[in-house]
Image (cartoon, rainbow, N blue to C red):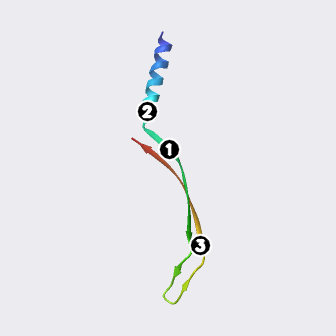
Amino acid sequence: MRRCTLVTLFLLISGLVCAGINFGIKAGYNANKLSVNIDSVSSEFKSGMQIGVFMRVG
């Protein structure tokens, strides 16, 4: 009886805790083609990558 009560309590608490937490991975790609200087304007293709993780509570 005590084991069943503990398991039920554990499931209820873990369900409440995990219900408000989201987490994941975010990734993005950046591309830039225009570069402006005082003397000239050049169009070189520059690219970049962003990777991160997030966690939302609430």
Q: Nearer the viewer, mark 3 or mark 2?
A: 3
Upstream in sequence: badge 3 or badge 2 = 2
Counting other residues with Cα less than 10 Å from the Cα at mark 1, is it few (<14), some (14-19), or many (20 or more)? few
Q: Is mark 2 on a helix, strand or loop?
A: helix
Question: What is the C-alpha distance between the residues marked 1 and 3?
Answer: 31 Å
User: Measured from the top left, where is residue 9 in percent x and y?
Assistant: 44, 21
Left or right of 56: which side holds 28?
Answer: right
Residue 33: percent from left, percent from top = 56, 75
Q: What element carries label 1?
A: strand
The image shows a total of numbered marks equal to 3
Is disc 1 in contact with disc 3, using a CB cutoff of under 8 Å? no
Q: Which amino acid does label 2 sit on?
A: Val
Mark 3 near mark 2, Cβ–Cβ under 8 Å? no
Q: Where is residue 23 in the image (x, y as percent from the top left)?
A: 50, 44
Q: Distance between the residues labelled 3 and 2?
A: 44 Å
Callout 3: SS? strand
Residue lying at 48% horizontally and 9% vertically, measured from the top left: 1
**Residue displayed at 47% across by 42% down:** 22
Q: In the rendered image of this protein, does residue 29 appear above or below residue 41?
A: above
Q: Which mark is residue 46?
A: 3
Q: How crowded is mark 2: few (under 14 residues within 10 Å), some or many (20 or more)?
A: few
